[in-house]
Amino acid sequence: METNGKDDLKTQFVTREGCYRLLNLSEYSRPNRVGYQSNQNSPQVRVSFVSLPANCSSQQQQQQQQQSTEKATGLNNSNGNNVNGPINAITSSTSLSSSFTNGINGIQDQSDWICFNFGKELYTYAYRGVKKAADLSKPIDKKLYKGTNPSCHDFNQTTSTNEGAPLLVGFTTGQIQLIYPGRKEQGKLFNEERLIDKTKVTCLKWLPNSPNLFLAAHSSGHLYLYNEELPCSPTIPVYQPFKCGDGYTVVTCKSKSTRNPLFKWAFGLNCATNGSSVNSSSSSSSSSTISSNSSSYSCASDNSSINEFCFSPCGTNLAIASQDGFLRVFLYETMELVGIARSYFGGFLCVCWSPDSKYIVVGGEDDLVTVYSFNERRVVARCQGHRSWVSVVAFDPYTTLTTWDQNDFSDDENQYEMSTSSNLNNNKRHRSASIRDSTLAPEKLICYRLGSVSQDTQLCLWDITEDILRPHHRVRLSTLDPTQQQQPQHNSNILNSSTQCNNKTESVQINGDCSANNSGNGDRSSTSLIIKDTIDSSISNSHIKTMNSSNSKLINCVSGSSVASDNITNDNCNNGSSSSTKKGKASLISVGNNSNTNLSATKVSLNDEKTNNHSTFNTLTQRFTNFSFGSDKSSKGSKKNFTLVGKGSGTSVDQKGNSSQNCDGNSATSTLRNKSNGSITTTYDAMKLIGTPACPRFDECPVLEPLVCKKIAHERLTALIFREDCFLTACQDGFVYTWARPHSSYLATSSPTVPHSSSTIV
Amino acid sequence: MGTNISQLERDIGSDFPANEHYFGLVNFGNTCYSNSVLQALYFCKPFRDKVLEYKLKNKRNKETLLTCLADLFYSIATQKKKVGSIAPKKFIARLRKEKEEFDNYMQQDAHEFLNFLINHINEIILAERNQGKVKASTAGVSITENGSTLTNNNNSPNTATTEPTWVHEIFQGVLTSETRCLNCETISSKDENFFDLQVDVDQNTSITHCLRCFSNTETLCSDNKFKCDNCCSYQEAQKRMRVKKLPMILALHLKRFKYMEQYNRHIKVSHRVVFPLELRLFNTSDDAVNPDRMYDLTAVVIHCGSNTNRGHYISIVKSHGFWLLFDDDMVDKIDASAIEDFYGLTSDIQKSSETGYLLFYQSRDAEK
């Protein structure tokens, strides 16, 4: 039982791309390390990152402007002597570390800041990457709060300068503070009197590319949009309805002058009660629609805390993971609910988008990582391997790759890293520069790398190949019998060769669009893939039926999204990025949606072919959890029918109980239809959702095994961030660890300098 | 104490549910093991309803532990005040008469008590049914009609001889143990009834994981070989236990007391084991009737302290959407987020801890 001895912590592990190593010298923690201190009931230790840009005059101007506006608006930072607002930073040692300043003036043209919270404390350090040891003696900023604990934080990448970046901090008591780490000034407080929300801030994020708008989620289950330049309402805000949908409402502050919060989102039962009580006069119609919904909303009426939310890398969609076990996806600008998923049981604790905005992963109290296809609006896979609740899920955009006709991956990897790093220099938000540049090679298939950390103190890595995620398993199983399986393979081979030339021309065209939009590599590759899909499907004869339906849906979706982008133009809150960009992107994406869904059958066979030919790919392919008892299928009428043969022999899937799968496939398409009719869900009742695309039964959905599952800490893990040459994990005991990727030249000893030429640091 | 009680009413405020009473139970000297379990059972709605029904149907029987329990539940349910405390004097007196082990002022194991209570009540019902067989036939039928939300009880082999009591219907599940002989590959399966599942605890895991481990395949070898009927000899075999019939109320016992030979006593295992408010089982058998039955956490019996002998039991229960903490005669409203205080400790440093010990999950379809 005592499997948790002190020595069994992994400090390195091997995957197909090589060996990941824990860097002892790049360990970030509080400056004075004391013995074990229980941080058990403190807020989750979270980590925020910002990459400060190189010297850039325009940004400095922006920064100066910002400073001046701050002075103009007059901060209420009156030394924090307020009784109601217990936020009171007693120690604010703002010593801008000399080493850091050197870093800027010296060789380094870009630097990173790392921020984490521990108990009542909040630290900001210069993150020195894998090549330099952490210098804990000189934090850029450290704060100690009285009467409250910081619970979440986020740097504003958009307004960051070479001198720093604004940092939002949320607190367990509901307040939000905007600080400038390293500067003496105290910053601004929002919700200082707790008039807006008294509950813990659970997630806090700047809007993508926004200098001043941010969203704050609370454990009350409400989500608020703030503008940091606006004052908060001096009294308890009075709201009026703004938007109302299936199981959610959005209200706005009812006041003459614009005040914070700009919008308040409420979900589930809460929204019915609040919506009607706050403003009963004008919202009678809206609240009635909600109450009809709420009757079927049986679960989690008592606690629907938002645990995390996340914008899609393309910036258009917002995914929200809640304690009520729901993932809700909104088209952010129109505030339209466009997708839901339900956990198998328990709350969803964390959420992350794939780099190409096609998939959402959520982790939760069912110990599972659930993969949701945003395009198909269904749960496509569940990942089982953690022994406790999943606290963070994150895609690794640097290892999410496509496979093609090369056997040696490692060489490729290097090539890739070089190429991206050069790209990245042009790209300030390098998070969006995601997957392997597709123009380099004709791609067949995307393999997403996913990481997750859990309260079980383990790190899991998962490889998710698109062939697993696509509905072909079902389509194929239900429509084709094994004897006919050969045929589509032939088809697709022909298709493949014929489309490659098409693909090239098309993708060039699209690339032109996208790069103009500054939308990063991820979008580019995905669009080119999509185009190929469409071509595939249009040639494919064997699936005329599905094709027809795809066409009809396509029309619906495209029209839907263009409406959406019209709204974008009208929306005042949207600043920055031009609306035309979004429009283009949105329609492209929706084209992708539909072709993907129906394409599956041809696509799979193509993949199978690949699997047979290249042994390297077999390790990539997901192995399903084998449920069969012992070596043979002992149990009659086995429901756990995903006994996929992992090695060689292609992806043949055992099929039993196909009736249920059949239904499922049908219902999947029906929701898509529903969606185009404007209704994304008919119920929030977990009992009714089981067996639907939002929450398939456990045996209806592929169950994936981890690629790597390692115990790496003694305390529960609370953060996971992938970077180009490393990844970071954080632990509830207040330690942030850096793991060097394979082939990255990291700091083995404490030797101070590394030749600049070989640097892959961004 | 009086201030505490009015505080509870103030905390709950206008949402105070009608016809609901939150009454603490007075401690008669180390009877918190009983108090905590009784509170948990009282807030398992199907169980409470059946006990109250029993009270109304059986006006004046000979005193049994069940009549004492029924009287206690009835007196809580019919209190004029909404909150307060009550002395379960008669119940405790009866309990001490019924079972020698409880006839002292020592701390007892809450799980042993729960186990004893459920089995004992069940026996009382069966005995009463056999006793008045002539007229009992009607009563028995009416009980099954009212109580049954389960779809198939009829082919459960072990209950085939006797008609299931309402205790069966509420707490009884069926485990199927499949054993595969490694010599002849024959699989034999055997069904067992259970009133609760006893799971081992691992550090930094979830109850979900503990339940999955419960159903891990174990190899029977060396001293522990399996007698294969097919081979007619002892053979190595693989064995696995999975849930075939999911009970209406799933009672889980976390095995937190481990006998340590070197200390010659039981040591408390304070490992952090998280338990969600909602639960489905992963370890169901292939022929399970309702494998994706959804459970809601309704009550937790918590052990406080460092070992079995010195310690205290309290319970938290969910009632009408909020959580209450019962500590003998004291009742407090707690926030759902406070439940995480009872998961356990992540460090191995021996310390007193307040850890979930018995979990009561109620099937969501049981409410309808």
Image (cartoon, rainbow, N blue to C red):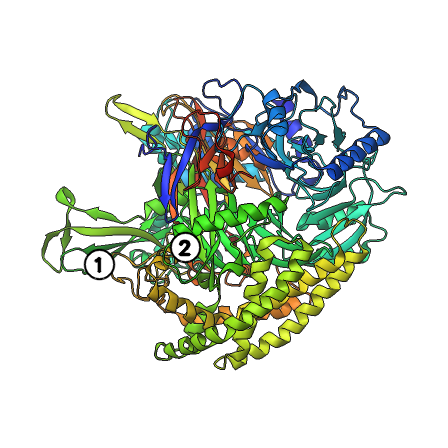
Q: Position of residue B69 (x, y in %)?
A: 46, 38
Q: Residue at x 36, y 69 (%)?
A: A656
Q: In which quadrant is the N terminus of chain A drawn? A: top left
| Amino acid under disc 2 | Leu
Q: Position of residue A761 (x, y in %)?
A: 53, 38
**Residue B314, relative to residue A526: is it above or below?**
above
Q: Could you say whether the residue bearing mark 1 is in a helix, strand or loop?
A: strand
Depth order, front residue of A42/A410? A410
Q: Are marks 1 and 2 on the same chain?
A: no
Q: Could you say whether the residue bearing mark 2 is in a helix, strand or loop?
A: strand
Farthest residue to the right: give it: A256
| Separation of residues labelled 1 and 2 (CA atoms) | 29 Å
Farthest residue to the left: give it: B233
**Residue B209, relative to residue A558: is it above or below?**
above
Residue under mark 1: which chain is it in? B
| Amino acid under disc 1 | Ser
Depth order, front residue of A205/B163? A205
Q: Position of residue A596 (x, y in %)?
A: 54, 68
Depth order, front residue of A694/B306? A694
Query: Can I make out residue B117 in this image?
Result: no
Residue beneath disc 2? A704
Residue beneath disc 1? B188
